[in-house]
Amino acid sequence: MINSEGMQKCGLVLGFYLIIALFFPMDYAHPDTSALKKKFASLGIIMLAGTPPPASHGLFDMDGNPVTLSDFEGKIVFLNFWTTWCPSCVYEMPDIEKLHKKIDKDEFVILAIDLKESSKKVKKFIKKHKLTFNILMDEKGVMGRAFGIRNIPTTFILNRQGGLMGKAMGPRDWGGGKSIDLFEYLLKTE
């Protein structure tokens, strides 16, 4: 049995740890969450908790082969929802191409998912804009609905385990220094 003196010592020790926890919080989810938050904030990216994305089905590559997000586990994934008729989407495509050319493709992949358009129209767009990154087709909008896409372009960043790390709504300068810095950081730390 613990006497009252033992209870007091126990209470003091617990109080000490509570104060430490309140004034010096630690984030165990990521080794340096504050640095990642700053990098995301500089690009207007909303930080997400790393939860798994919706099940991927209804996606096809430009040759008509089925593709799932799990095909890219082990890589940092840049997942962009777009259309050929969206001016903001068209505006950011050259920047996405710059990002694609600057980041190591062994550990990083860009997946641009076209929503509800024909592959013929998208192939024409790819050729016109000389795009070399992965473009996938969601002709029925299944993935768009699963991800809750309401505005385009919308971009998600997935970690190596396939968890959702970040979300950006609207166009960004994906080929600029801040973006390159973010993805190089993610490749080193994730």
Image (cartoon, grey):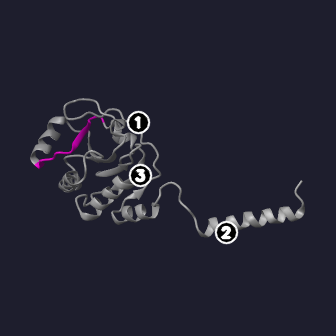
Q: Is residue 187 left or right of residue 126?
A: right
**Which tag is nearer the camera, tag 2 or tag 1?**
2
Query: Could you tell which of marks 3 and 1 lies nearer the N-terminus?
Result: 1
Task: Measure the C-alpha gap from mark 2 to mark 1.
Answer: 42 Å
Q: In this orientation, which residue lies closer to the viewer: 5 or 163?
A: 5
One can see residue 151 in this view: no
From the image, tell me which residue sits under label 2: 19
From the image, tell me which residue sits under label 3: 165
**Which tag is nearer the camera, tag 3 or tag 1?**
3
Quarter residue 120 falls in: top left
Q: In this orientation, which residue lies closer to the viewer: 3 or 33?
A: 3
Name the residue at 15% across, 47% down: 131
3 and 1 marks in contact (CB < 8 Å): no
Relative vertical location of residue 99 with respect to residue 115 in this rendering, above or below: below
Query: Could you tell which of marks 2 and 3 lies nearer the N-terminus?
Result: 2
Per the image, label 3 sits on a secondary structure element best described as strand
Residue 55: image location, x then y, percent? 41, 36
Tell me the amino acid under the disc marked 2.
Ile
Mark carried by residue 55: 1
Task: Measure the C-alpha gap from mark 3 to mark 1.
Answer: 16 Å
Residue 125: image location, x then y, percent? 14, 44
One can see residue 127 in this view: yes
* Magenta-highlighted residues: 129-140
